[in-house]
Amino acid sequence: MDVSVTLACLFSVFMFFFVATFFLLILNCLGLYFYRQWWGPLGSFFFSTTMLTSVVISLIFVFFHQLTNGTVWFIDFGRIFFLFDLFDVNLVFCVDSLSVVTSALVLCLTLCAQYFGVEYMYREAFILRLVYLLNFFATSVVFLFFVYDFFLVLIVWELIGLFSLLLVNFYSLRLYTIKAAFKTFIFSRFSDFFIFIVFFFFVLVWQSSDLGLLFTQIPFFLFYNIYIGPFGVNVLNFLGLLLALSGAVKAAQFLFHVWLPDAMEAPTPASALIHSSTLVIMGIYLIIRFNVIYEFSYLGNLMLAVLGSFTVAVGAISATFQNDIKKLVAYSTVSQMGYLFCGCGFLAYKEVLFYLTIHAMNKAFLFILVGYIVHFFTGNTDLRFMGRFYNCGIDLTFMLFVVSLNLTGLPLTAGFFAKEFLVFQTLHSDYFSLLVRTLWFFSFILTPFYMMFLNLWVVFKSNQKTVSYANPKKKLNNFKLHNLTTNLASEAVAKTTTCFFILFLFTISLFGEFLATYLFTPLTSFNNLLGYSWSTNLFNELSSVNNFSTGLANALSFLILLSLSTALRYLVKLTK
């Protein structure tokens, strides 16, 4: 009796926080839309920040409750729509680790992008429209992560496409912006077409859009085929291919990636939220949510691995030859999304979710830093007109190096271990896995080069072309981020800092793997000190990866050092 009462109390508290999450999100959107003119930019910002912070706290409590109980909650509010005997729609929510982690990630990125957006565009005429569009977009994405009915997934999918189109078309008076918005709209329709075919098939066969029912019936269709004339294909392979194509368009994979660089016409805060993490991870989320189909679909997994591996190589090669700083970061995002898509093809969903979180945080922060750099150069995004940024932003210089090293995969960083876990899943003896690793090798070579080249070009290249700089006393001092270090940014300090960065990079490249091996080797004294079995299991799991990590870390360290020296040598020739 006491156990049942305790569970009922815990479920009541859990339901309170879960319902409060959606209530606060809807209240936030309605308040921003109807009272934005009365509150103004700062009032809207503080109201939205308070609401989103409360939602993140609620999600943290829900996640803690889920981890402690080890359960997945399905909350069904009953039927909301039905059409005779064709199909019915239920308002169902699924609360699992995937939905909670991705929702908390999106809301944290929204808070960062919103703070940066209000600071970056405070005196623009349409700042209020940017604030409520960012919140509408984030709310739609959170609903997508939690809903567990296919019909509701389609509705929210269309809402996300609508708000992303409005953000890309923010500066609608520019001709190139209209073209970019039109291209984004066309590719979104391709994604909607593929996912609608899957929805139509589910409704035609099961007369329901409840994902719980659909997933339980998927294994029984393992030996069913669809015939179009003399040609036939397995049902699950057919569904897996369609979902892979729909996710590939949203995740900007190979042959569908051309809309993402053009979508950089959106304001930089919108790019930091949408195109760096949120919009492109929708395709990855779609694959992970429908992972039951890919457990039985060989062709679907093959499509994911092929598209992802080619995207890794093509994105890295394209980013290397870009002169526009925002497009360089966009093609870098395309390349990194290829790792995630290819990892889904190898059924490494946990590793994909881990790398997705690491990449989203770092890439959003990189977009914010790029926004500060573009603002410093009075809106110029051409790398050939940049240089000597350290004179006015030594703090941004340091953070730019740290984020770039993490995205590059320097040993002892989170980016290195996230990539290592993904590469570890491709270590098979077949020729297809060898092809995947060969294509990934292009990214391993080129990613350190273009990231270090970006840093050194923007920060230390002596500018010889005509460009108008923003006055740091009038522009950069408005940013709270610069107040502490602007006065210290002299050329002598910058040269000393540069030498320190290179020395630090050289030291970690040579000795980083030995430090990692020492840290991740199970120490007898440490295990005896703790005395818990989980610590022994944890260190045993980590040390089991060391046999592979040693070679990978040494190879990556050599490539990073080689890329840095090559970029330095190339810049020395340019500055003479």
Image (cartoon, rainbow, N blue to C red):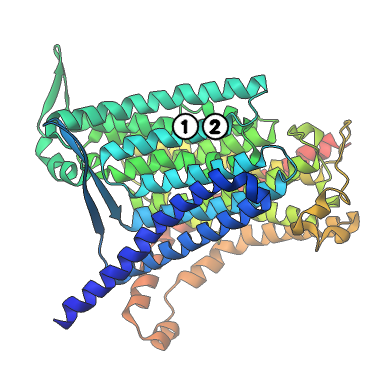
Category of crowding for the residue at label 2, using alpha-carbon neighbours closer than 10 angstroms: few (below 14), some (14–19), many (at least 20): some
* Residue drawn at x 25%, y 40% as measured from the top left: 294
Circle 1 sits in a helix, a strand or a loop, which is it? helix
Indicate which disc residue 316 carries: none
For the point 37% across and 71% down, the residue is 538
At a point 32% along the width and 79% down the height, the residue shown is 533
Could you say where residue 478 lies in the image, as x and y percent from the top left? 80, 53
Q: Which residue is mark 1?
A: 162
The amino acid marked with disc number 2 is: Leu
What distance separates the C-alpha of mark 1 from that of mark 2? 6 Å
Q: Is residue 318 visible?
A: yes
Q: Is residue 473 left or right of residue 339?
A: right
Residue 238, given in percent of the width and then of the height, sits at 23, 28
Q: Secondary structure at mark 2?
A: helix
Q: Amino acid at mark 1?
A: Leu
Residue 9, x across and y down, in percent: 26, 74
Q: Which residue is mark 2?
A: 166
Residue at (27, 44) in percent of width and height: 291
* Residue 524 x, y percent position in the rendering: 41, 83
**Left or right side of 208 for 179:** right
Can you say whether 563 is above or below 48 in the image? above
Outermost residue toward the top in this view? 229
* Mark 1 Cα-neighbour bin, 10 Å: few <14, some 14–19, many ≥20: some
Proximity of marks 1 and 2: CB atoms separated by less than 8 Å = yes
Tell me if residue 346 can be seen: no
